[in-house]
Amino acid sequence: MAEARFLIRKSYSEKSLTKTYATACALLASAIVIIILSVLLSQSGSAILDSGPSLLGTEWNPARNLYGILPMLYGSIIVMMIAMTLALPIGILSALYISETLSEKRRRVAKTALEILTGIPSIVYGLIGVSVLSLWVADIFGLQTGRIILTAGLLLAVMILPTIISLSEDAISNVSTQYRENAYALGLYRYEVIKDVILPQAKGDVIGAGFLALGRALGETMAVMLVIGSLDRIPSPAYNILASGQTITSKLGREVAESAFGSTHFNVLVLMSLILVVLTLSMTLMAHLIFRTTDAHA
Amino acid sequence: MLSRHALDKSLTGLIRVAFYISMALLLGLIFAISFRGISAISLNFLFLPARDFGASGGIFYQIFGSVLMVTIAAVLTLPIALGTAIYSSEYMRSNRKKRVLELTLLSLNGIPSITYGIFGLILFVNVLGTGISWLVGSVILAIMMLPTVTLSTVQSMRSLPVTFRENGFALGFSRAEVIRFIVVPQGLQGLVTGLLLGLARAIGETAPIMFIATAFSGVTVPVSVVEPVSTLPTHILALAQQATNPAALKNAWGASFVLLSIVFLLSLSAFYARTRLKNLNQRL
């Protein structure tokens, strides 16, 4: 009898221990995002108070207390656009090839290879950019330096390519075989099957994949920082992608270590980082919410 | 007007060409790194410390620093990932709450790596006053690994057939015992896979650690936790910035090749663990 009571008590306390441990971990894990955002927010609030309207200017000059972040914002967006314009079509078409023409075995090999390629560290891309790609670009366009916006965009396009192929391939091969078989049985050609049956079904998830890639492209630092030339101004004319520029991330990578903690300079950099997080988080969340809705349809 | 047949041929050709372009780009990349990297590698390069700001000597302490930092990061992230996964798969009833937790973790994954560096710089290095410390770097990398490890563990716990749990309860197990003897062993496959993937990502990260945990030259084995170490990615960064010096550049390629080999080895082990452990579980 005493032993039984002991057993009951033991299992009771063990149960609550496991539950307490699991609950504490889950709370900690979910709190981290909030902690990160509040730390950034607490540090960047004073940046707005100190430099107010000059933040929306185009001139960055800490010595004169001018902290215009527009050139960086512009740089981030243009680099991302170049990368997406190149990588998205090639990526989706490649995904179609892998999903619609390769045998199951080869498909799996290609997928594994892509997943591994996704893991190439960005600093390695940076090295390639700085010592190979930027020299090529300078040669081709006859420029003095190849460290320009276009180079950053090209490098970023290659970087996000494996992600785009891999995710859109998932989306495309998730379309039920039944639809494919029915369409082929109706005598449709492959391009008709792709255009009229597969793409409409996979559309949502492919768009989700695009948003994820967008988020990644915006947040990429090392590779972009090494090849963009780090010039804090919007090129003139603005579409001149053969000029050097600066993105939010390259600015942060270059200057955070140089600015004194607590100075306006530092706080403005933190504010830029906060803007970056808000942008990438919205892309990421949008992507996953899109994935979710298409799941519900399936 | 093209016939359907001609349209089919040309569009099939188009996707084929796109695929070949992607393959050529990506394989060319691997080939370029290997070609330049292997010629820079020797036993001396792997086992000697760096000299002349990395232009000569080797990368022994960089390899050591990288491995140390990510190993401790994995040790830190493991218990929290396991606990969170248990909570999500065993204690959360509502699917909506599960979804919220999942989205929170995915958001963590979506935060740019440079932001983690700035966060660590503010909170640890300055507010908590740790100074430049490799342990802070490990903590930050642990946070970055957390979503991958947790979600992968949750996924494999979720794939556990209901009958396994029911059998456990029928044998008189308490919930804690079901978790300990049935759910956790099942989750191990996901945990190992996630950890390997997380390690592969963490060891290649530069931006999160460059302000808070590393120093470029003159660093050997740290004697305390509040000292910097030198790592492969930050070493490559420093060398890449002296891109006009051929000796430094050569060593940068060598270090990149070593880093890439470690990353690929870790991701390959992750895939191996995923299939191997899954088969093992299915046989049980």
Image (cartoon, coloured by chain):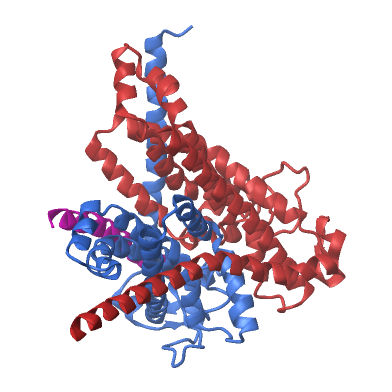
Chain colours: A red, B blue
- Residue B236: percent from the left, percent from the top? 48, 69
Q: Is residue B197 visible?
A: no
Q: Residue at x 48, y 66 (%)?
A: B144
- Quick one: B232 or A138, which is closer to the camera? B232
Q: State whether residue B136 is above or below residue B40.
A: below
Looking at the rendered image, the quarter that the C terminus of chain B falls into is: bottom left
Give the magenta range.
B256-284
Q: Residue at x 71, y 79 (%)?
A: A261
- Quick one: A272 or B29, which is closer to the camera? A272
- Quick one: A236 or B78, which is closer to the camera? B78
- Residue B8: percent from the left, percent from the top? 38, 17
Residue, far bottom:
B223
To which quarter of the image does residue B120 belong?
A: bottom right
Q: Is residue B277 magenta?
A: yes
Q: State whether residue A148 is above or below residue A19.
A: above
The secondary structure that most of the magenta stretch takes on is helix
Residue, far left:
B283
Is residue B240 shown left or right of residue B181?
A: right
Q: Is residue A135 magenta?
A: no
